[in-house]
Amino acid sequence: MAKKTWLLFVLLLLFHGLYAHLGSPGVIMEGKAGPYKILVSIAPPDVIPGIAKVRIYFQNGTVTSVMARAVYFHTGDEGSPDAELMKTVPGQPGQYTSDVWLMNSGSSSIQVSVKGSLGNGEMVVPVVAVSTAIKKMPRSTGWILSLLGLILFVLMVSIIGYSVSDALTKAGEELTPVRKTYRRAGIVAAIVLTSLVIYAGNSWWKSWIDTYNRFMYLPLKGKSTIRTTGGSNELLFALDTLSNRSSDFSFVVPDHGKLMHMFVVRIPMMDAFAHLHPQRLDSAHFRTLLPNLPQGKYLVFADIVYNTGFTETIKDTVNIPSASPETARMLDKDDGYAFAPPINQAVGTRMPEGEEVISCGKPGYGATLKDGSTMVWEGMTNEPFLAGQVYQLKFSVLDPDKKAALLQPYLGMPAHAAIIRNDGNVYIHLHPVGTFSMAAETNMLKRIAEPQGLFYYPDPAKFRDSIDHYIQYLSELDENKREELLMQQMNMPQSMPMDMGMEHSNMVEFPYSFPLPGNYRIWVQIKKDGKILTAAFDKVVK
């Protein structure tokens, strides 16, 4: 049993995944490349093969060179290209940029190597590389290419036809009947040959189109069902077993000790929110108990991670017919929920009463948490943010007596955040290290160090059984020991959040770039005195 436990620890270190998102494809990671503290921003392509836009911000040291290359999980170090030199950004000291080709779909990464005044350093930033778009050629370009193709066709036919007739006739001589026949035969042969070449090329191109369409990423579907049982509302969540990825369902691995992170938020007011951790019934079915969420229509975002590090967010909607008659029961002790005023003061239904009702953070005031503490968004103003720009979202927590609060780790992290646009088309589960865990770097570093090239899947039944045993083991651990274990798996320092580069133990910080304009609600969750506390903040992005 001890051997199995340690094997599972190793598996989870190796296969820890990226963080989930929807409509927010950019990757942001804040960490260290050896002695250098850096912030990496990656805009992955929406077509594979494609170019990832990489930008690095150095926060210390003098850099002499920065190299970047793509590394693919399935092929490892052996199947990766050579690194290329990144360029400095004109007028922006300490910033470097590069275009990196991603040639393979799936779980990938960008490996960054740094040389400078502090020595050498390396960092691996995981990226999910998938094709999500079909590019269309402009009509004008199509007409131009068609005309050029027709000219080339005529030229090819003419060259071949005249090469067996006129080209063999001396200047001033008349073509003989035989050579005129050769010309006609050459032209016919050229037409047939060139047409066959065009047909073969067109068939080859169509086969590539069919392959691309067949392997283009399509969001995984899920179905949410509400039923009342034992005095509580129960949410049943089913993954689409008809999906071509259903064979991967057995390879779902824990992320922060949970097989699924689920966020539900009421629309359109965005006023009721819950972060839940459903229990797996089998490979494709999960269940959880809902807290006392009021009646209404809800968006459901379910995050899962596969053993390759590939992450998916499954989006659904569900109608809750009435609030749960029993509010004391929770399936998972790490579940948390809260109610806040409707987004941007929109008109909504009356909120329920109770300690879970919180205020929405305002500039200069902060958000009141359910235990009387206050969370303040440092530097918050009413000025809108700009889409595409990287921001540091920094929050401080004060006790009811206005002294700095002492925060506890929550699922191995200083804090969690869910950022959702009011139409539900942008969502991300965010952490202080960025849009994925620091363990994702360990995942790829271990994969790069492996001697074999290709990755082979383990037996699905045995793998799923071992993961279920590990989840059960985690649930039976003392809370402090469990948090210590989760932090070790994600390379989180025991003295966090001070070692996370934050100014005070009551501070949490999230780097993020809002991908699109719109009205956003930011839900920030922390743990204090053994309680999970939630705050809400609104932000307009232009």
Image: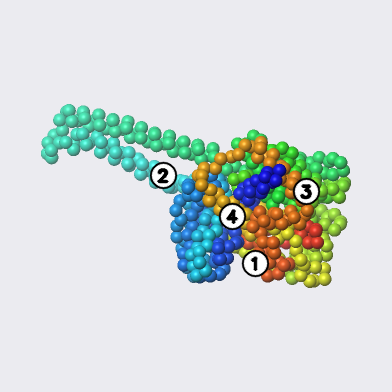
Q: Quadrant of residue 196?
A: top left
Q: Amino acid at mark 1?
A: Gly
How far apart marks 1 and 2 lie (CA) works out to: 56 Å
How far apart marks 2 and 3 lie (CA) works out to: 67 Å
- Work out whether residue 318 can be spotted: no
How far apart marks 4 and 1 lie (CA) works out to: 18 Å
Element on which disc 3 rests? helix
Q: Which residue is mark 2?
A: 143
How far apart marks 4 and 3 lie (CA) works out to: 28 Å
Tell which circle, 2 or 4, labels the residue nearer the N-terminal end.
Answer: 2
Tell which circle, 1 or 3, labels the residue nearer the N-terminal end.
Answer: 3
The residue lying toward the viewer, choosing from 292 and 403, is 403
| Rendering colour mode | rainbow
Comparing labels 2 and 4, the label whose residue is closer to the camera: 4
Q: Which residue is mark 4?
A: 441
Q: Which residue is mark 1?
A: 501
Residue 180 to residue 14: above or below? above
Tell which circle, 4 or 1, labels the residue nearer the N-terminal end.
Answer: 4
- Work out whether residue 476 can be spotted: yes
Residue at (48, 49) in percent of width and height: 80
Dot 2 and dot 3 residues touching (CB under 8 Å): no
Q: Quadrant of residue 336?
A: bottom right
